Structure formats: structure tokens, C-alpha cells
Amino acid sequence: MNKVLLAVALLAGVGVLSACSDMKKSLGIENSAPNEFMVTTRAPLTLPPDFDLRPVSSGSAVSPAIAPQPTEFSEGEQALLSKLR
């Protein structure tokens, strides 16, 4: 009988304490939403230092990234490409 009474008292105590918002926060039951009024400030955006670059003149060397690709492949390239097919 004592065990049943103790169990009922414990359940009633847990029920009463779970209704308290502070107890919910301390137990981690209640989710806390972020505060939308807490705004963080950031540094202003800046332009990169080389923003005023001039376009490449027609007589200068072309970057290898935009140079025309060769139509003929070496033996090593052909061997690698044959494995892909």
C-alpha cells in the first residue's frame, strides 16, 4: 500500500512541476524559439581591389583556360578515354 501511495504522490508531483515553465526549461522539455528582435550587425560589403581591370587586348596571350582545345589526343589520353567508354 505504501508503494502505491508513493508512486501516486510522485506522479502527482511530476505532473504539478511539469506545468511550471521554469521547470520545463530546466528539464529541457520546452523548446525556446529564437528572438527575432535580436539583430546582428555585419560589416558593410566592399568591392574587390582589382575591380577596375581592363579587358584583355587582342595582341596579348590568351589564358590557357579559354584557349581552344586540341582535337588530337596523345597516346596516354587516348588510353584513358578508351577506359571511360
Image: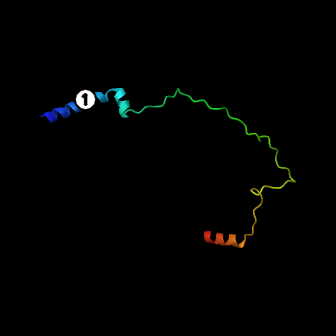
The amino acid sitting under disc 1 is Gly
Q: Is residue 47 left or right of residue 6?
A: right
**Residue 11 seen:** yes
Classify the position of the C terminus by image quarter: bottom right
**Does residue 25 sit above or below 57 in this rendering?**
above
The answer to which image quadrant residue 72 occupies is bottom right
Residue topped by disc 1: 13
Q: Is residue 40 left or right of residue 1?
A: right
Position in image of residue 53 (x %, y %): 80, 43
Position in image of residue 9 (x %, y %): 20, 30
Position in image of residue 61 (x %, y %): 83, 55
Name of the residue lying farthest toward the right: 59
Of residues 73 and 4, which is closer to you in this image? 4
**Residue 85 seen:** no
Q: Is residue 18 left or right of residue 46?
A: left
**Does residue 31 sit above or below 75 in this rendering?**
above
Which residue is drawn at the image coordinates 14% and 33% (left, top)? Answer: 2
Which residue is drawn at the image coordinates 53% and 27% (left, top)? Answer: 38
Which residue is drawn at the image coordinates 76% and 58% (left, top)? Answer: 64
Of residues 73 and 46, which is closer to you in this image? 46
Q: Residues within 10 Å of mark 1 (few under 14, many from 20)?
A: few
Q: Is residue 1 left or right of residue 85?
A: left
Position in image of residue 65 (x %, y %): 74, 56
Classify the position of the N terminus by image quarter: top left
Which residue is drawn at the image coordinates 41% and 33% (left, top)? Answer: 31
The answer to which image quadrant residue 81 occupies is bottom right
Q: Name the secondary structure under disc 1.
A: helix
Q: How is the image coloured?
A: rainbow
